[in-house]
């Protein structure tokens, strides 16, 4: 079971894994994954098509891209569409995610760019590193988190955590050095939040120091079941211990020793300094740092063009220059002034304090059903998420009898190439509205969900 951001886009089947002289997997000899298109290959034409084809090949990991290839059939998704648009902007091509979803094939997207179709995205100022001193302003997403923490400092609702099972001989000192390097590289991992004399929240970036790694040794427990149970308890304890946003640190690392060559690495961060995308950045960079250090080398990572505090300052300047009013006008037009509460039938009245018990139910859909869903949605030019959203809206409408359905959806919000490798809180919440007709079919609702998702 993997978090959604770690689910592979393609699986390659091999008869055997290539090995090096030491009997380990020779990663350099592994074949590059290839997405294939059922369409006959036709070379890209013109500068825009050729530029986009190169970007697609890089982002999607394909050998070549033809002018009739479909972005989503080649393995694209909404996250990858953001990477494509960010890198297109860097290459001087004005592309927005809506054009990718509306036109999908390389040639049609290039044509839309050439004719200016759907190019409604306003000009966004250049994002660069800021000259800064002392405490710094928060981004708007961080302000929301700070406000929620002030209401309930003991809450762990906004903790982001993950665990990695490490098998084989572990170099603990290399692991420590790897996390120290991560904290040195990313300012967010050494940032705390305090209130200034005017009562405003400010972020303070501390000097880098050694990461305190909580060590737990369970080797003395003879029963594998007992070690497994205790490791889960320790992981939950690390995850459910509240953070102090004013004192920090807001990165917590635990190493649980299960056997001489088996460990569990637990990483916990507060959402105010990270998001799901950040977790993948941490995993990728930790692997690179640790792999280099066990060989006595320094990891080679590209320099970061900005830090999160630069993004926070850029965002505030952009919004204060008129973008705030434009966005408020847009959402007020689409959502109205008030947000009605969805009246789901429940067996108890809503609690006044906003606290609820919750449980997670997991289930799996059969593979053949997923493939049929995928083909059906492709026929509508939609993604699996759009289909899920449409079905969810229909379900809510059937349960409540209401026709105005609003669903909040988190989005990655990394529409700038400079933010791809930065650890920070970029996630935004988008409120999608669908006004349903009680006679509509799921296909008709899907069309509405597709428009909302765009």
Image (cartoon, rainbow, N blue to C red):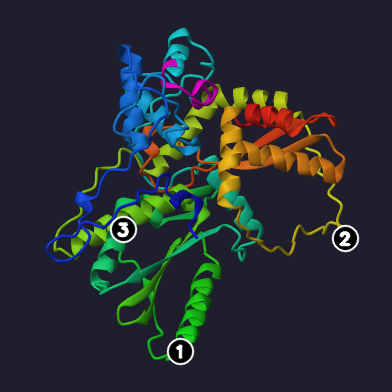
Q: Which residue is mark 3?
A: 286
Disc number placed over residue 185 in the picture, else none: none
- The crowd level at tag 1 (other Cα within 10 Å; few <14, some 14-19, many 20+) is few
Q: Is 104 one of the magenta-colored residues? A: yes
Between 75 and 431, the residue placed more toward the observer is 75
Q: Secondary structure at mark 2?
A: loop
The x, y position of residue 68, in whole percent, is 41, 20
Rendering coords of residue 273 (x, y %) = 47, 52
Question: Does the segment drawn in magenta span residue 276?
Answer: no
What residue is rendered at 47% in x and 38% in y? 79
N-terminal-most mark, 1 or 3: 1
Q: Is residue 159 above or below residue 33?
A: below
3D distance between C-alphas at marks 2 and 3:
47 Å
Q: Which residue is mark 1?
A: 223
| Kind of element beneath mark 3 | helix
Residue neighbourhood size for the residue with mark 2, other residues' Cα within 10 Å, grouped as few (<14), some (14–19), many (≥20): few
Q: Residue at x 46, y 83 (%)?
A: 227
Label 3 crowding class (10 Å Cα cut-off): few <14, some 14-19, many 20+?
Answer: some
Q: Could you tell me if residue 200 is visible in this image?
A: no
Q: Residue furthest left?
A: 21
**Above or below: residue 249 compared with residue 89:** below
Residue 134: x percent and y percent? Answer: 39, 47
Determine which residue is flagged by label 2: 347
Are circles 2 and 3 on residues that touch, CB within 8 Å? no
- x%, y% of residue 212? 36, 70
User: What range is drawn magenta here?
Assistant: 97-107
Q: CA distance from mark 1 to mark 3?
A: 31 Å
N-terminal of the two: label 2 or label 3?
3
| Residue 313 sits in quarter | top left
Residue pictured at 30% horizontal, 26% vertical: 54
Q: Nearer the viewer, mark 1 or mark 3?
A: 1
Of callouts 2 and 1, which one flags the residue occurring earlier in the amino acid sequence? 1
């Amino acid at each position: 079971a993997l978090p959604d951001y770690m689910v592979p886009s393609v699986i390659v089947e091999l008869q055997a894994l290539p090995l090096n002289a030491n009997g380990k997997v020779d990663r350099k000899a592994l074949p590059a994954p290839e997405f294939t298109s059922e369409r006959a290959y036709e070379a890209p034409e013109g500068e825009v098509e050729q530029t986009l084809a190169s970007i697609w090949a890089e982002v999607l990991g394909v050998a070549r891209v033809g002018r009739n290839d479909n972005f989503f059939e080649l393995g694209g998704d909404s996250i990858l569409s953001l990477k494509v648009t960010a890198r297109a902007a860097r290459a001087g091509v004005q592309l927005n995610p809506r054009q990718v979803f509306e036109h999908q094939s390389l040639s049609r997207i290039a044509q839309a760019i050439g004719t200016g179709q759907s190019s409604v995205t306003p000009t966004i100022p250049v994002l660069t590193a800021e000259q800064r001193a002392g405490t710094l302003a928060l981004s708007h997403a961080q302000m929301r988190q700070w406000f929620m923490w002030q209401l309930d400092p003991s809450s762990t609702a906004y903790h982001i955590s993950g665990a990695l099972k490490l098998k084989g001989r572990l170099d603990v000192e290399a692991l420590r050095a790897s996390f120290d390097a991560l904290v040195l590289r990313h300012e967010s991992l050494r940032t705390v939040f305090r209130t200034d004399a005017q009562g405003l929240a400010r972020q303070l970036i501390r000097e880098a120091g050694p990461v305190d790694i909580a060590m737990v040794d369970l080797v003395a427990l003879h029963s594998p079941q007992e070690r497994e149970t205790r490791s889960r308890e320790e992981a939950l304890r690390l995850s459910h211990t509240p953070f102090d946003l004013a004192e920090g640190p807001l990165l917590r690392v635990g190493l649980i020793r299960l056997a001489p060559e088996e460990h569990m690495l637990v990483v916990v961060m507060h959402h105010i300094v990270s998001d799901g995308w950040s977790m993948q950045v941490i995993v990728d960079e930790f692997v690179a740092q640790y792999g280099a250090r066990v060989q006595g080398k320094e990891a080679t990572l590209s320099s970061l063009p900005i830090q999160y505090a630069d993004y926070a300052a850029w965002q505030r300047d952009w919004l204060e220059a008129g973008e705030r009013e434009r966005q408020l006008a847009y959402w007020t037009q689409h959502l109205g002034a008030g947000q009605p509460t969805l009246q789901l039938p429940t067996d108890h009245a809503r609690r006044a304090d906003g606290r609820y018990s919750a449980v997670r139910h997991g289930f799996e859909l059969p593979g053949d059903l997923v493939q049929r869903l995928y083909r059906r949605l492709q026929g509508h030019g939609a993604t699996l998420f759009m289909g899920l959203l449409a079905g969810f809206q229909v379900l809510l409408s059937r349960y409540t009898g209401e026709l105005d359905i609003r669903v909040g959806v988190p989005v990655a919000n990394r529409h700038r190439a400079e933010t791809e490798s930065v650890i920070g809180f970029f996630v935004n919440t988008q409120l999608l509205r669908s006004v349903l007709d009680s006679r509509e079919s799921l296909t008709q609702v899907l069309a509405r969900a597709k428009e909302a998702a765009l």
